[in-house]
Image (tube, helix red, strand yellow):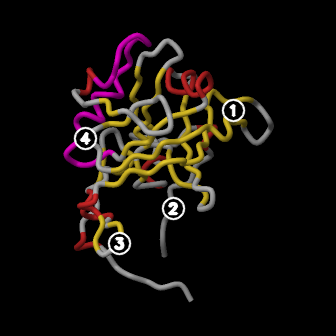
Amino acid sequence: MSRFHSYRPEEGHRLAHDPFNAIVGPRPIGWISTRAASGIANLAPYSFFNAFNYRPPIIGFSSIGWKDTVRNIEATREFVWNLATRPLAEAMNASCAAVAPEIDEFTLAGVTPLASTRVAAPRVAESPVSFECRLSQMLRLTSADGTAVDSWMVFGEVIAVHIDQALLVDGVYDTAAAEPVLRGGGPADYFTIDAAHRFRMWRP
């Protein structure tokens, strides 16, 4: 019979590291680029990220704290999601440094800004996939009792998609070939996907 480590989050987890992030994972990285109203580009990764709707396509990420990314999106109502891949992992990690708003994280991370087609925020030229987005909703999260939390959920409608053609095989996107970086929780755990771990299961 299984033995469980049980706890109430408000009382602490009593472990070396909060297991919540590791359990809800691995999660794709929301590598979000924005442009401030002043024109300065910003680039930052968010591990609370996912897709939430097909038509229109909607993605979203949660920012713990009112950060430059959220401030820029509130002002401009647009952003770009860039796929973080294994070759770009170190650059993605460098872009999460806590720096002043006037610092351009594209330069800090050593990646190239590429003009988007429908929004002012630049794409990451080295990323094989990018979604240009317009803000659809921005919500401050609350606890179950209605208390405001210092986190903001940002949803964006994808209005332009850019995919490296090398990742399209007979018209099907090859997830494993893209080598996406996924956050796994723990103090420094990330994962990738490879074709050896693929299995197929058709819906009934």
Which is more N-terminal, label 1 or label 3?
1
Q: Label 3 to label 1, Cα distance in Å?
A: 39 Å
**Residue appearing at x 54%, y 47% in the figure:** 159
Crowdedness near tag 1: few (<14), some (14–19) or many (≥20) residues, C-alpha within 10 Å: some
Amino acid carrying label 2: it is Phe
Asked whether the residues under the numbered discs 2 and 1 touch, taking CB atoms below 8 Å apart as contact, a structural biologist would say no
- Residue 58 position, x and y percent, is 59, 51
Q: Secondary structure at mark 3?
A: loop
Which is more N-terminal, label 4 or label 3?
4
**Disc 3 marks which residue?**
171
- Residue 185 position, x and y percent, is 39, 46
**Residue appearing at x 39%, y 46% in the figure:** 130
Query: Residue farthest to the left?
Result: 87
Amino acid carrying label 3: it is Gly
Q: Nearer the viewer, mark 3 or mark 4?
A: 3
Amino acid carrying label 1: it is Arg
**Disc 4 marks which residue?**
126
Instruction: Indicate which disc residue 4 carries.
Output: 2
Q: Which residues are magenta?
A: 84-106
